[in-house]
Image (cartoon, rainbow, N blue to C red):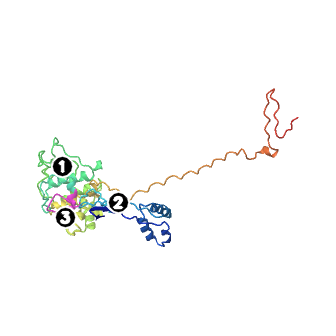
Amino acid sequence: MGSIEKGRVVHHQPKPVRCWPGLWLKLGSFIPLLWLLSACQGTEWGERLEHAVRPVGLPTAQPELPASPSPQPLPGSIPPSISAPPAPTPSSPRPSPDSSRFADLEPGSLVARSVGYLDRLGVFADISGSEFQPQRSVRRGEFARWLVLANNAIHADEPSRQIRLGSPSERPLFLDVPEEDPHFRYIQALGAAGLITGDANREFRPNSLLSRAELIRMKVPLDLPPGQIKGSRAELEERWGFTDAAQIPPEVVPALVADRSLENASTVLRTFGPIRTFNPFEPVSRGEAAIALSAFGERTAQDALPQPPALPDPTPEPQPSPPAAEPQQTASPEPDPTSASPSDAVGPIRPNPPEVAPGEGRIVTPRQTQS
């Protein structure tokens, strides 16, 4: 600051703060010492005082750096401190046991499951649309087609159980089933295998409705190996106890007796349940035909479907333990030249005196006296 004195400006220099180097010795606290260093800063005594105090352990003031702003997470992102949850592993979709392309089947019912399995095996490829009509009666030619396709699909790994399809070049076995009939190849195959026979007029009647007796006669021989279709009417009454056993046609009796020997795999029990009256001439519905064709003996259509690939086991396999380390062989210590040897037992070995060249004179060692 300056002052005006007789018309001129006089600049006053600030008086230096006097600092006594011995003053800090009289102070008993740390805070006055810091104030003293600040007051004497820039003076000769301040530099001496600073050099005298710094070895004691006073920290040197460091300039404070501005704190860098922490990055803010974007909206919807996961903060770095929180680990993201593991992504779900996609699993292979498994088909529902009763999945079907037909919309008129009750989900979960025995008919829906049977139709679904057989349809995936290609048995019902001739049915177009989204309705199966399970309550409608099935015709003989239609059932013959499904019977051959279902048997060959379920026994696909058994060539001896396959039914060879008929060829259009073959002579028709039944006069009412010509080569242009859509079911000719299947009806011809069943006739050649002896599973069906024509009537007196050599006709099969493919458009007639299939009865219960005809279903058992055509189906049961494919449930059992050949030669086991035997039985009498007395055995039929004894094993089944049907109230209408006398009305059952004689050509169907052996098939019914053999079917009873299958126990729970019986076509009658699987299709119609534990009935007391057989009703041999009652028409078979399409739903009942699907249930009957869903298994041949112990082989089922569900077992014949291709199985989905197995999922990997989430449990990690135990890793083999590393081989045990071989014990390190300790190297034998090298012999110490200063150590004693067996020859030391006799006495110390003295070095031979160095050879002397002729004319150089004799070398006198400390232990020898000069002659």
Q: Magenta stretch: give its range.
A: 96-117
Task: For the C terminus, give its image quadrant.
Answer: top right
Out of 131 and 314, give the one closest to the viewer: 314
Quadrant assignment, res 65: bottom left
Residue 125 placement, left or right of 295: left
Q: What SS does tag 3 mark?
A: loop
Quadrant assignment, res 8: bottom left
Which comes sooner in the sequence, label 3 or label 2?
2
Q: Closer to the observer: label 2 or label 1?
A: 2
- Real-space Cα separation, disc 3 to disc 2, in angstroms: 73 Å
Residue 357 placement, left or right of 288: right
Residue 65: mark in rendering: 2
Query: Is the Cβ of the residue at disc 3 closer than 8 Å to that at disc 2?
Result: no
Q: Amino acid at mark 3?
A: Pro
Q: What SS does tag 1 mark?
A: helix
Q: Amino acid at mark 2?
A: Leu
Q: Can see residue 184? A: yes
- Kindly identify which residue carries mark 3: 107
Q: What SS does tag 2 mark?
A: loop
